[in-house]
Amino acid sequence: MVNESENFVVVVDWEFMYTASVEFTDAPPWWLLLEMLEYWTKGFDDWYALYESRLRVFLQVMMDSEADAHQIRNKRPKESQRLSSRMRHSLESGDFWIMYAAWNNFSFDNIYWNKIDQRFFGSDTSDDNICDVWKKRLHLLEPEEKENMNKYVDLKLQENETRLLCWDPDQYTLESMARMEA
């Protein structure tokens, strides 16, 4: 930045600049395992168990660092001032999973059905095939929303007529395709 005399007065390095809602800041780092959930070959539960153990260590070190920083200033930190407390609350409340799903859209389905759906709709779906749980939620939609959903599925299936599918269609998709042909 320059002043009126066109002399440099400030240099701003924007390289690592980042802006997001505070909920992203309060969420604990997802990278503690150095491997994203969507690439974890042993599944969601295994990833989360190991992640949670690493997070405990991370948060303890963070709490110790926060205490040291406040000790230097001879002040006792309030819990609301501790980022470690807000990170722990984010994980406990389930906000972490919303942030993780927003950051890593390839894990969205897995995260949604394992964590987010249960948070907002309260039922445990762990006994069901994760690919079929959505059917239990159809009653929550208004008739117009169901109609729009069917229109969207039809639109996507029409698009698939011009390209090859990279996956085996499930029963719902096969039924929708049959409806289109009728």
Image (cartoon, rainbow, N blue to C red):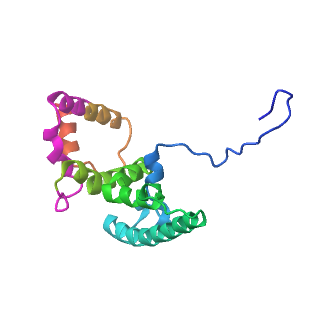
Give 11 or 148, whichever is nearer the viewer. Answer: 11
Q: Position of residue 132 (x, y in %)?
A: 19, 52
Does 93 sit left or right of 124 as displayed? right
Quadrant into which the C terminus falls: top left
Count of numbered marks: 0
State the image quarter where residue 68 is shown. bottom right
Give 161 or 154, whichever is nearer the viewer. Answer: 154
Is residue 93 visible in the rendered structure shown here? yes
Q: Residue at 40% x, 73% y: name it.
A: 53
Q: Is residue 152 above or below residue 169?
A: above
Give 48 or 65, whichever is nearer the viewer. Answer: 65
Task: Let me know if residue 125 is in the magenta part.
Answer: yes
Does 22 sit left or right of 151 as displayed? right
Task: Let me know if residue 54 is in the magenta part.
Answer: no
Q: Residue at 36% x, 49% y: name it.
A: 98
Magenta range is 124-151
Q: Position of residue 177 (x, y in %)?
A: 22, 38
Give 123 or 55, whichever is nearer the viewer. Answer: 55
Q: Position of residue 77 (x, y in %)?
A: 48, 61
Dominant secondary structure, magenta: helix
State the image quarter where residue 181 is shown. top left
Q: Name the outermost residue toward the left.
A: 139
Quadrant into which the N terminus falls: top right
Q: Is residue 141 above or below residue 34?
A: above
Q: Is residue 68 above or below residue 151?
A: below
Q: Position of residue 103 (x, y in %)?
A: 45, 49
Q: Residue at 86% x, 28% y: name it.
A: 5
